[in-house]
Image (cartoon, rainbow, N blue to C red):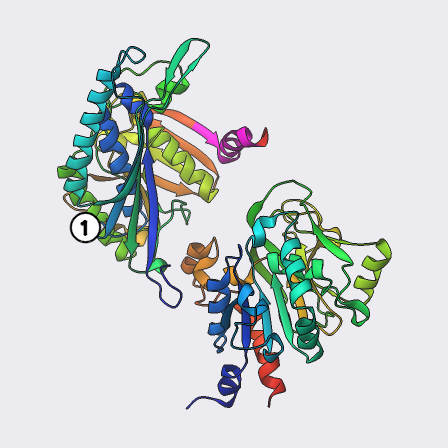
Amino acid sequence: MRSELDLRRSQVKVLILTGLGLNCEAETAQAFRMCGTKPELVHLSDMVDGRAARRLPDYDIMAMIGGFSFGDHIAAGVVYANRLRTKLSAALDEFIARGGLMIGICNGFQTMVRLGVLPGLDGDYRTQRATLAANDRLGYRDAWVKLRVEPASPCVWTRGIETMELPARHGEGKFLAESDALLARIEEQKLVALRYVDDTGAPTEAWPQNPNGSPHAIAGVSDPTGRIFGLMPHPDAYLYGVHHPQWQQKKLDGTLREEGEGIRIFRNGVDHVAAARA
Amino acid sequence: MVEHGSFDGYVLSEGINPFYSDIDTRWMTASVIDEAVRKAVGTGARLDHMAGLDNYCWPDPIASEKNPDGGHKLAQLVRSTQALSDFCQAYGVPCISGKDSMKNDSTMGGVRISIPPTVLFSVIAKIDDVRKAVTLDAKRAGARVYLLGVTRDELGASEVLRVLGLGSGGRVPTVEPGETLPLYRKLQAAIDRELVQSCHSPAKGGLAAAFARIAMASEMGLDVDLDKGLHTAGLDAANALFSESNGRFVVTVDPGSAGAFEAAMAGTPCACVGEVTAAPLLRIRHGGVLRVDAAVKELKASWKETFDAI
């Protein structure tokens, strides 16, 4: 007999937009499947041209996945954001107004920031007010990072998580607000959900623990409702215990788990929707 | 992993060594095939579920006025492809694809420059359960270090000679499937039974470089005595440390599993040559003398500094 919660989870409608250089759909879909949902993968062009089975606002959760959309031309996420802005603006507004949840991972986060969906202050999800700039140490870097969740953050995706290790794989991850004043507001409103930390657990701007030099060690940000979240590191890449680089040590220690730490983020999103249905 | 939802997976490995072509493209080809195969075996992948790719990168093999030694290069090519056939069949590894890039020559300032005959051999192999996969880094201080396989006087076209500017002289490493296949099968079975904590196969730079890589990867030390090696004991220090003989592995094993491991490897060349140490120092003895005594920190700094300059 399926539990009531499992039933509600299975009814959560998850959209994963794909195509045009994005490449993390398999693992992002698997993450959502591991949380009890049946995510739907829809090519952006199908959504834009009206060939998709559902409209954007019909979904409970929308995932903007990692990859190299449009080859990072001009800058990462710019062209994808332009496409969404010109073709799906109204649909996106409706999705957000209905209380939809959004998660943007790496390229997805970059796109959301260019769109203005994040930080989403003052109910304005349309004006770009921040950017994800080139890493201080130029170049793409793929390495695991240590993260700490801000306990006072309203972000539903990071509830109950204190720390996490995840791979970060990007060349443009430095979160910059348009002004110091805006950065101060972002901090005041607790919109920083996730920070890069060093081995002592303290937020750091030092390379390589902070791979891009983001001020205030910002790794992930939410909007004031906490339903819309973006992060540079990849929770979709730590689904299984064996994803961790020291998994063999953990196996010998007896601390290797079947599930990876990244799943918790997806489970928070899914269960937030499932609980609201009760 | 092959697909989400199950733990079977695949392993990718390669072998490449154009330097051996200075001596004999048959053994160059055999060596790179063996290197790719044994690296995959050393992770726990299945010897009986492997496919290969042969990528050829060759200088112009057609004799002409501009290419007076074309005949020699063609002969090298023939010898290489014969070896490809011999050793892929011996190992049961079909070549499912490949590439040939011929005529890699250039004339600069009136001088004709040709690339050395090169084969890049890649292997894709199935591993039944990725949770049993083995990596090169030693895991626990006190683990026993075993040397598997045969070390011979084979310094021809080796890394050590190259680094020291001493030319290509010496015997190029050969491949003996009669020796390697039984060893690979038994090692694979031992890995499957989870008797092995780490595994790494020496290639360029021989045992010394292999031990260094293991130490750097684990940030622990190794204390080894090559006078305990079955073959290294009888070789001179240069060969013991730097010979690039094929078909070998450095394996670490928990002392509690040592008996079971040695029994599993019975009938193949297998000797305990030392142990993993908590202190991050690489110490290698041979001929009763401490030949290598290096801090892992120094090894790593030296190894990385080339890229730091970029």
Quick check: can you spot residue B224?
Answer: yes
Quick check: can you spot residue B156?
Answer: no
Q: In this view, does B49 lie to the left or right of A91?
A: left
Q: Is residue A252 left or right of residue B74?
A: right
- Bounds of the magenta span? B293-307
From the viewer's side, name the closer residue of B14 and B157: B14
Residue B62, image x, y percentages:
25, 19
From the viewer's side, name the closer residue of A139 and A123: A123
Q: Main secondary structure of the magenta part?
A: helix
Q: In this view, does A161 lie to the left or right of B188?
A: right
Residue shown at 53% from the left, 28% from the top: B306
For residue B37, above or below residue A40: above
Residue A84, image x, y percentages:
65, 63
Residue B277, image x, y percentages:
42, 42
From the viewer's side, name the closer residue of A238 and B208: A238
According to the picture, the residue beneath numbered tag 1 turns out to be B263
Residue shown at 41% from the left, 40% from the top: B214
Which quarter of the figure has residue A138?
top right
The C terminus of chain B: image quadrant: top right
Numbered disc total: 1
Tell me the crowding category of disc 1: few under 14, some 14 to 19, or many 20 or more residues within 10 angstroms, Cα based.
few
Residue A46, image x, y percentages:
53, 67
Q: Please say whether residue A123 is one of the residues in the magenta stretch.
A: no
Q: In this view, does B290 lie to the left or right of A218?
A: left
Chain letter of the residue carrying label 1: B
For residue B250, above or below residue B165: below
Query: Which residue is at the far top?
Result: B110
Residue shown at 51% from the left, 77% from the top: A53
The N terminus of chain B: image quadrant: bottom left
Q: What residue type is labelled 1?
A: Ala
Q: What element carries label 1?
A: helix
From the viewer's side, name the closer residue of A233 and B77: B77
